[in-house]
Image (cartoon, rainbow, N blue to C red):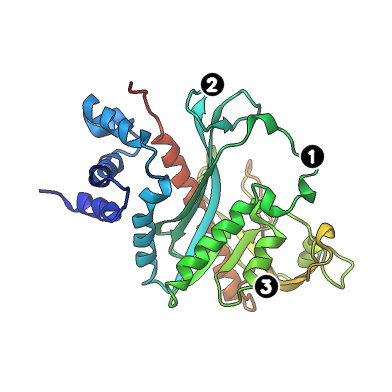
Amino acid sequence: MQDLFSDAIMDEFTEAQLGDQRLTRRLPRLADALARQPDASIPDATGSWGQACAAYRFFAHTDFTPQDMLQPHLARTRQRAAVHATVLAVADTTTLHFGQGAGAQGLGPVGSSATQSTGLFQHSLLAFTPAGLPLGLLDCQWWARDPARFGAAGGRNRKPVADKESVKWLRSYEALQTHAAQTPATRWVLVADREADLYELFAQAQAAPRGPGVLVRVQHNRSVERSTRRLFAHVTQTPVAGRWRLNVPRRPGRAARTAQVSVRFREVRLSAPELKADQPALTLWAVEVREAHPPRGCAPLHWRLLTTEPVRTLAQARRIVEWYGVRWGIEVFHKVLKRAGRWRRCN
């Protein structure tokens, strides 16, 4: 008799449509085996070499796509999210390394040189409650870089975002809009690190005033409309609104700790970048969190955040900071995912 864990895993994938009933039936069983030992190799997780070979044959099929396998899980994630008033959709990118000179087709460079390591890029959109409880994936994108174009970054800023890898953030937002349209009682907010600090992403969110919000850590010191100061100085000139103790999660080489931080916040109207001068300015809210006296050997915590969510009170500012802190969960997810990616060739 199946236990509750197996029932839950099976339920995530039983409605998959892979075009072949044998494959469709195998997917939930394979997902159950891998979920029980996420850091094990496929032979260890499946329990025998015969079952491992069957798993490799399953993954070798070209009649279905990864998205076909994920569709029932994405729907389950949306169902779990629908019972929450607010859900954070955290987006981030990771690399899946297959080793130097891996023979599989469709791979590209993922290291610092065109020949160092080959693999894929994965951009995930993962749902969390504001308390940090993961609810499941909402979207996933994969791609490989062309080795012939490795290092060809010249003129990148002049390319439209649709022609750059940065389009991944806009696609994540579009996927989130689809989920939001089917869960009208839930407030969705896309949360991301500095790489997502794109004019186009904020503009896309503001073009849909009833759509999901956006919360991003700032990378660019943008121009402030009708001000001689740029964004960083503009926010720093704002009086400190409050202080509190913030839990800083454990990171590689750094233990978890508590930081005493001060917070500033204000509404800002940011001009479009110079290369998009014909585009309108954006009205956003900026929140700055700064640690003045970190422990010896620790870099001070300093977050500059931009959001489409209104921040008019200290309580709202604290909520934004706590939401951004949930972002760490996707890094844990990617770490587990890559540990589970070990495999052996089965001829």
What amino acid type is highlighted by mark number 2? Gly
Q: Residues within 10 Å of mark 1 (few under 14, many from 20)?
A: few
Q: Nearer the viewer, mark 3 or mark 2?
A: 2
Report whether residue 249 is seen.
no
Could you tell me how far apart the alpha carbons at marks 2 and 1 are, in whole angstroms? 26 Å
Q: List the residue tagged with mark 2.
A: 101
Label 2, secondary structure: give it. Answer: loop
Residue matched to label 3: 241
Q: Is residue 328 left or right of residue 293?
A: left
Tell me which corner region of the image, top left, top right, bottom left or bottom right, holds residue 128. Answer: bottom left
Q: Secondary structure at mark 3?
A: loop
User: Compared to 5, does 86 lie above or below?
Assistant: below
Q: Residue at x 36, y 72 (%)?
A: 83
What x and y, as percent, mark residue 67?
42, 50
N-terminal of the two: label 2 or label 1?
2
267 or 289, which lies in front?
A: 267
Q: Amino acid at mark 1?
A: Gly
Which residue type does callout 3 highlight?
A: Ala
Q: Which mark is residue 118?
A: none
Q: Earlier in the sequence, mark 1 or mark 3?
A: 1
Quadrant placement of the C terminus: top left
In this figure, which residue is indicated by the disc labeled 1? 154
